[in-house]
Structure formats: structure tokens, C-alpha cells
Image (cartoon, rainbow, N blue to C red):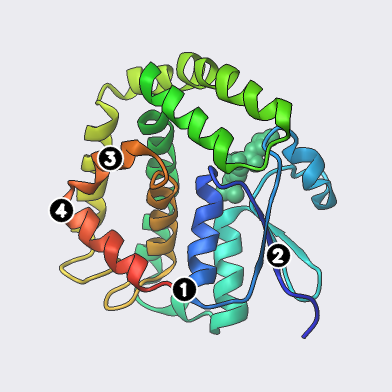
Amino acid sequence: MGQTPTLHLLYSCPFCWKVRGLLEHLNVETDYVPVNGMRIKKDVAFTGDWGKVPVFTDEQGKHHVDSTPILRIIDEKYNGGKMASRGDRARQETWMEWVDAHLSKATVPILYGSLGSALKTTTRISKIENFGFISKRLYAWAGFPIMWGIIARKRVKKDGRKPKQLWHDLLTEFTDAHDGQPFFGGDAPDLVDFAAFGYMRSVSPYPQFRQLTDHTNGMAWYKRMEASLN
Ligand SMILES: N[C@@H](CCC(=O)N[C@@H](CS)C(=O)NCC(=O)O)C(=O)O
């Protein structure tokens, strides 16, 4: 037994949503601890110099960092490693890398790729995250030109596709790899499904999510993933 596991997170962090989905699916009792986005390093200083979220702390008080390794640890600890051992290992590894490389890069363009969407996103984030009074306002107004001007515009330009088209292409590629099954993992989701679901779910609190919901196969899979949560 021991203490209740905790997950230190930011609601706007896609990596945190990867872990959260798996915990919800496996019904692992967890305390979710939101950190302050303006001082993540300080809030997770107990991890040493890692300084990022998500951080998963298990019953024994051991800290685990980095979302994909955390997914594997949670599967191992609370599910007998069943997800990792199902199906073809090489296929799973290849697609986990694909998901982490591609879907992770698609969230910033859809959320911040135009000035209007960047403003919508930072305003929403300032409302849902655990900011102090001043930093909340500072983030809402100073955050969006930074995200839009520096990060997102560069990425959109480099890829060449509109953020919506990028998501649709990736969802097509991903759902085609399900080989006609309801999930990447076959008749039940596996770790690759939860990684991909986390990235997509992290967009769901924002109005731009509508640009993803009209991808028929992607959305059908997303709904099946939602239905698999507890
Ligand atoms: N590879 C890490 C990335 C985690 C990450 O970059 N988290 C961001 C929030 S979305 C963070 O905590 N950044 C703080 C920093 O880099 O100072 C994972 O998959 O968990």
C-alpha cells in the first residue's frame, strides 16, 4: 500500500494528458496536482533538475518522469504490463516514436498558428491553469504574441501545411495503421493509443478542437477512447 499516487501536471500540457488517460482507463486512484505554469521548475524541484511535468509519484513515494516511460511504468505496475506485451513489439515501438514525433508537433500549430487562435488559447489557459493573480493576466496578454510570433509561426511555415490539414493527414495515417480494428492495439487500446489520445485530448478544451472533430475515422476512434475511460 502506501500513499495515494500523485500526478503533477499542467492542464495545457499534452504530455500530461497522455498519462492521465491511461490512469483513468486503468482506474488508478490518483491525486492530480496542478502546478503553476510560471514556475514549473520550482513546483517539481523534488525531481532534481528534470524540472518538467508530468511527474508521477507512486505509492512508495518514488518519482517517475517523462511521459512515455511513465506510460510503460503505469502499465507494468497496475496492469501487469499487458499493454506493452500485446501485439507486435516492433510495430508498437515504431508507432510510439511516430506519435511522439508527429502528434506532439501538431498541437502548437493548431493552438497558436494564427494570431486569433493564439489569443483564444492563452486566454483559455489563463482561466484553467493554476496561476497567481498577476501571472494569470500577464500570461493571457503576454503569452500569445510569444507563442504565435516565435514558436508557432515558424513551425507552420516549416511544415507548409495549414494546421488543420496537418492534423487531418496525421489522423488518417494513424487510423489507417489500425488495420480495420477499433484501436491501434486491436480490440482494446494499448500504450500507443493512449499516447495519441493524450495529444488530441489536450486540444479538446479549445475552440480549435472543432477543426479536428470533422475527421470521421479520427473522431470515431477518439470517442471509443473516451468511452474506455473510467
Ligand atoms: N519529454 C517530456 C516533455 C515534457 C515537457 O516538455 N513538459 C513541459 C510542459 S508541456 C514542461 O514542463 N516544460 C517546462 C520546461 O521545459 O521548463 C515528456 O514527454 O514528458
Q: Secondary structure at mark 1?
A: helix
Q: Which comes before the other along the chain, label 2 or label 4?
A: 2
User: Which disc number belongs to residue 6?
Assistant: 2
Q: Which-is-in-front pick, marks 4 and 3?
A: 4
Q: CA distance from mark 1 to mark 3?
A: 24 Å
Residue to which mark 3 is pinned:
167
Count neighbours of disc 1 (C-alpha within 10 A) and say few if under 14, some if 14 to 19, many if 20 or more: some
Eyeballing the image, is 113 above or below 80? above
Q: Are marks 4 and 3 in contact (CB under 8 Å)?
A: no
Along the horizontal axis of the image, is 200 left or right of 17? Answer: left
Q: Are marks 2 and 3 in contact (CB under 8 Å)?
A: no
Q: CA distance from mark 2 to mark 4?
A: 35 Å
Mark 3 residue type: Trp
Along the horizontal axis of the image, is 181 left or right of 14? Answer: left
Q: Are marks 2 and 4 in contact (CB under 8 Å)?
A: no
Judge whether residue 119 can be spotted in this image: yes
Residue to which mark 1 is pinned:
25
Count neighbours of disc 4 (C-alpha within 10 A) and say few if under 14, some if 14 to 19, many if 20 or more: few
User: Which disc number belongs to residue 216?
Assistant: 4
Residue 201: where, in percent of width, then height? 40, 52
Eyeballing the image, is 189 above or below 55? below
Residue 143: where, in percent of width, then height? 57, 22
Mark 2 residue type: Thr
